[in-house]
Image (spheres, coloured by chain):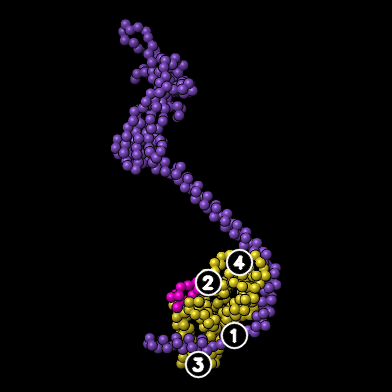
Chain colours: A yellow, B purple
Amino acid sequence: MDEKKLIKRALTDREAFGEIVDLYYKEVFRYIYKRTFDRELSKDLTQETFLRALKYLNSFKGKTLFIFYLLRIATNLINDHFKNEKRLRDIKDKHLNSVSAKRDIRSDSYDYSFMFDYLKKLPEIQQTAITLVYFEDKNIKEAAIIMGKSYAVTRIILHSALSNLKKEIKKDIKNF
Amino acid sequence: MRKKNKKDIEKIENMFRSVKPPELTDEEIESYKEDFNRVLLEKFSDITLQRDRRRVLRVKLAYGLAIFALVLTLFSFMYVKPYLIRVATARIINEQLRINIALKDVIVKDGVGIVIYNYQEVVVNVPSETVEIFQPVEYEPSDKERERAIEIIRNSKESKDFVAKEGEAPQDISKNDVVSIEGLMFPNSGKKLVEVYITYTPERYPPNAMLSMTTAKFTVDIEKGEIQP
């Protein structure tokens, strides 16, 4: 069925909204999980994403794909969640630093949890850009739509994120 | 240095490309989705209801704002514009005729400022800053206007403490006979003044003069309910 018609129906029809959930739940969940690396939190934030999408469904004008609309809501929720946790950030950062320091780092063995520890040190907007482009396989144009930024700004954010990551990794790996 | 930096960034990019993000099994996500569908079952009607309520509120707010803007515009036309014309009229008269006018004495009609001064009507066109002077025309006051003018005079301080000439003692002529009543109307403002002549006995007469009565003229502004100085 045409996505626009389905969304229009979903304004008042629970089953139609259920179809939307069927279509996009996995993609939204996987994106949130890559950003949070926490199953329970991902479950909660995915639920909140869809409920918020339902609440503001009449504001969706269909100018982009609906999945971009959902991912934008998810991004805002994740960023809000991280902002709320900011008070705990210092404690968490200390923990992360100690983990990184203790880690037996070999430049040829990087895994996602290793990268995630460094990603968490970046501002939320940079984390979003990296996750969308490198782990969600979105191109910069699509990432820009989801983030609500222009193409040029998204490129700058991405470049800044990589530069910041380089600095952080170099602190821990001398022969990087 | 720049080349090295570029190389480092490329290295980080390659790290990200080589890293495999954690993937959960479809079954696991499916179970989460089922949980969510149960939540949706409970909350769907509440959320749609809230959304409709919000939409209605938004529409009401938009109407409210539109009405407020309309009232504000009307208010501006009713009060602000006439006030600005009053101020400009007083300024133009002051500049061109060297007369100070109180803002309350300026009449605003059809976008022009009008001042009654010394039995003349001064009409000021504010945009072009032109001043025209008109003389009043005589008219026959109605019975109601006559009665009102007499009533104003009977109750006025001016008639109760009437002084015919400087130095004479004041006398009460408020109950004296009315000899004649004439009306004056100003052509642009439509403002009316009623001239009332009342008899009185002068205090001093020239030697050998016959005892006689003379008249005092009062000019009444019926609209304001007062005697013009």
When the figure is inspected, residue A18 is found, relative to residue B211, above or below; the finding is: below
Instruction: Choose the circle earlier in sequence order: 2 or 3.
Output: 2
Residue A38 image offset from top left, x and y in percent: 61, 80
Amino acid type, label 4: Lys
Q: Which residue is mark 3?
A: A107
Q: Which residue is mark 4?
A: A8
Q: Are marks 4 and 1 in contact (CB under 8 Å)?
A: no
Q: Are marks 2 and 3 on the same chain?
A: yes
Tell me, yes or no, whether the highlighted magenta stretch contains residue A144.
Answer: yes
Q: Residues within 10 Å of mark 3 (few under 14, many from 20)?
A: few
Q: Which residue is mark 1?
A: B22
Q: Are marks 4 and 1 on the same chain?
A: no
Q: What residue do we see at 49% from left, 75% from top?
A: A144
The numbered disc on residue A64 is 2
Q: Secondary structure at mark 2?
A: loop
Q: Secondary structure at mark 4?
A: helix
Residues drawn in magenta: A143-155
Of the residues tagged 1 and 2, which is closer to the observer? 2
